Amino acid sequence: MYMGLVAEVFGVYAAPGVFGISPVVVLRAEDGRILPIYIGISEAVAIHSALKNEIPPRPMTHDLLVEIIKRLGAKVEKVIIDDLVDNTFYARLILKRNDSEIEIDARPSDSIALAVRLGIPVYIDEKVLNEAYKDELPEDFVDFDQVI
């Protein structure tokens, strides 16, 4: 069983960057450390809307993926953010089908969007946290509601 730190999806924010505002999903590990992950606008909207329990009239991409996984008889067990290479985070989805465990390489943003929809745990590897954590939310982060 994986023994990384459990994290909550703390929120979606907008951060100033070289090319304007960039969306950021922020995770807070069980030990209080903050992990900001810069993501795309579509994934930010998907995570933000799921955190707000907003249900679109038609299924969006992540909702569709949840339904496909369910109809195939599988269940997403957890998300693991387990690597950081050249400022790019890597994640894995862990699925269970019958008695088999299936690992799928996935972007953290997509994985988090699924985790929020399914209410499953997100784990962060200790080495990733050690390399990229913040003690607190950066002051220049603005709540995503203010920019959409």
Image (spheres, rainbow, N blue to C red):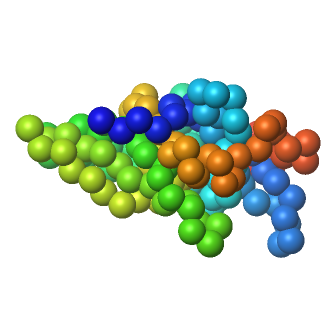
Which residue is drawn at the image coordinates 18% and 45% (left, top)?
101
Query: Front-most of 6 and 141?
Result: 6
Residue 106 position in % (x across, y down)? 41, 59
In this view, the residue in front, 101 or 130, is 130
Residue 121, horizontal then vertical, whole percent: 43, 32
Quarter of image, res 42: bottom right
State the image coordinates of residue 47 (x, y, percent, origin top left): 56, 43
- Locate residue 18, reporting x and y percent: 86, 71
Residue 38 visible in image: yes
Task: Name the one closer to the observer, 136 or 20.
Answer: 136
Q: Please give the name of the residue rendered at 63% of the width and 39% of the height, measured from the top-left corner.
A: 27
- Residue 15 falls left or right of residue 42: right
Q: Residue at x 51, y 31 (%)?
A: 6
Q: Is residue 113 visible?
A: no
Up-down relation of residue 61 to residue 55 (above or below): below
Residue closest to the far left: 98
Query: How many tags in the picture?
Result: 0
Please identify the quadrant where the N terminus is shown.
top left
Residue found at x 50% / y 46%: 125
Residue located farthest toward the right when viewing the structure as drawn:
139
